[in-house]
Image: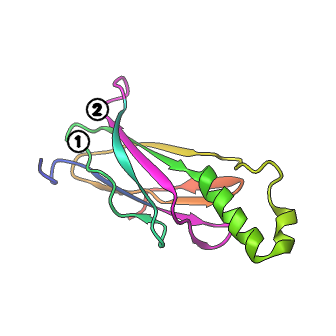
Amino acid sequence: MSTATTASVSTHILDTSTGRPATDVAVSLAARSGPSTAWAALGGSRTDADGRCKDLPALPVETAQVRLDFGTEAYFVSRDQAEAQQDASHASHARDSGTSFFPEVTITFTVTPGEHYHVPLLLSPFGYSVYRGS
């Protein structure tokens, strides 16, 4: 498999509500060769202290579309628990349901062989945005 004929993917997550990287978020990667083919799970990673996944699996040569799934619910629950422990007054501001409004975020995009795709996720408790970065 030549890297000149395959696309590659990287990502990172910024929690825009805190202005900090989102750490320890599960990210899974899947690919397919076209819109009418089944998704093939390729594996996953977790974001590091800088909010980055540096070890996502390689894409198969025939990849035309990619799907990134971000496990955001566990991140928000963990973050809210940590904040509540640091500041007891914050506990009254935590979500009453104990769950995230977006328990997961799924991003699907088209790739071209030989190109690199960096797809950052800007995340907050009640919204998110993605873009093709560099």
At 23% across and 46% down in the image, what residue appears?
Answer: 113
| 26 with respect to 126 (left or right) | left
Which quadrant would residue 64 be assigned to in this image?
top left
Q: Is residue 85 visible?
A: yes
Q: Residue furthest bottom?
A: 86
Numbered badge on residue 33: 2
Q: Tell me where the magenta segment starts and ends, as one range.
A: 12-38
Q: Nearer the viewer, residue 116 or 13?
A: 13
x and y, in percent, of residue 55 in the image: 32, 59
At 46% across and 51% down in the image, what residue appears?
Answer: 27
Numbered badge on residue 76: none
At 26% across and 54% down in the image, what residue appears?
Answer: 115
| 31 with respect to 72 (left or right) | left
Say whether marks 2 and 1 touch (CB < 8 Å).
yes
Is residue 23 one of those drawn in magenta? Answer: yes
Tell me which numbered mark, 2 or 1, is placed earlier along the sequence: 2
> Is label 1 in a helix, a strand or a loop?
loop
> Is label 2 in a helix, a strand or a loop?
loop
x and y, in percent, of residue 121 in the image: 53, 58
x and y, in percent, of residue 116 in the image: 30, 56
Is the residue 42 above or below the residue 33 in the image?
Answer: below
x and y, in percent, of residue 94 in the image: 80, 60
